[in-house]
Image (spheres, helix red, strand yellow):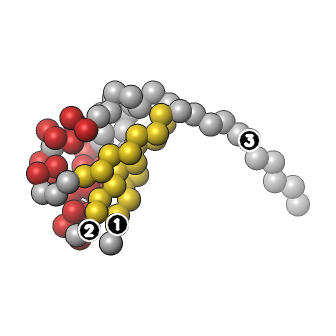
Amino acid sequence: MAILVVAEHDNAHLRAATLNTITAAQRLGGDVHVLVAGAGVGGISIRQLHMSPCFHLEPINLIIFEGSYNRSWEISS
């Protein structure tokens, strides 16, 4: 089973809640993928995961999507 964790971050660091979620996902078993998305997220790297306790349980796949997409939707009745 593959698990996708959508990371909460401040464009430089992953939040503690994200690291806790990664740890919980690893304990469930299967492949864990972490999606880091947003404008200016280049400062977040696999190095941060290496320094966290969760990294040593199982390998983690880090997916970084750096960019922004602005689109407004108009919903009419």
Q: Residue at 88% across / 60% down in the picture?
A: 77
Using the image as rendered, state which of residue 23 and residue 63 is in the foreground.
63
Q: Residue at 81% across / 53% down in the picture?
A: 75
In this view, 38 is above or below 17: above
Report if the CB atoms under discs 2 and 1 are less than 8 Å apart: yes
Question: Mark 2 packing: few (<14 Cα in 10 Å), some, or many (20+)?
Answer: few
Q: Please, what is the three-letter code of the amino acid marked with disc 3?
A: Ser
Marks 3 and 1, how far apart at CA: 32 Å
Left or right: 72 in relation to 69: right
Task: Find numbered disc 3 in the image and state the secondary structure of the residue it sits on.
Answer: loop
Q: Position of residue 7 (x, y in %)?
A: 37, 47
Whether residue 20 can be seen here: no
Q: Position of residue 33 (x, y in %)?
A: 34, 55
Looking at the rendered image, the disc whose residue lies closer to the viewer, 2 or 3, is 2
Task: Find numbered disc 2 in the image and state the secondary structure of the residue it sits on.
Answer: loop
Question: Mark 1 packing: few (<14 Cα in 10 Å), some, or many (20+)?
Answer: few
Q: Earlier in the sequence, mark 3 or mark 1?
A: 1
Looking at the rendered image, the disc whose residue lies closer to the viewer, 3 or 1, is 1
Q: Position of residue 14 (x, y in %)?
A: 30, 39
Left or right: 62 in relation to 47: right
Left or right: 73 in relation to 35: right
Q: Position of residue 63 (x, y in %)?
A: 38, 45
Which mark, residue 2?
1
* Figure quadrant of residue 69: top right
Q: Residue at 47% across / 34% down in the picture?
A: 66
Q: Please, what is the three-letter code of the amino acid marked with disc 2?
A: Gly
Q: Residue furthest right?
A: 77
Q: Please, what is the three-letter code of the amino acid marked with disc 1?
A: Ala
The residue identified by callout 2 is 30
The residue identified by callout 3 is 72
Question: Mark 3 packing: few (<14 Cα in 10 Å), some, or many (20+)?
Answer: few
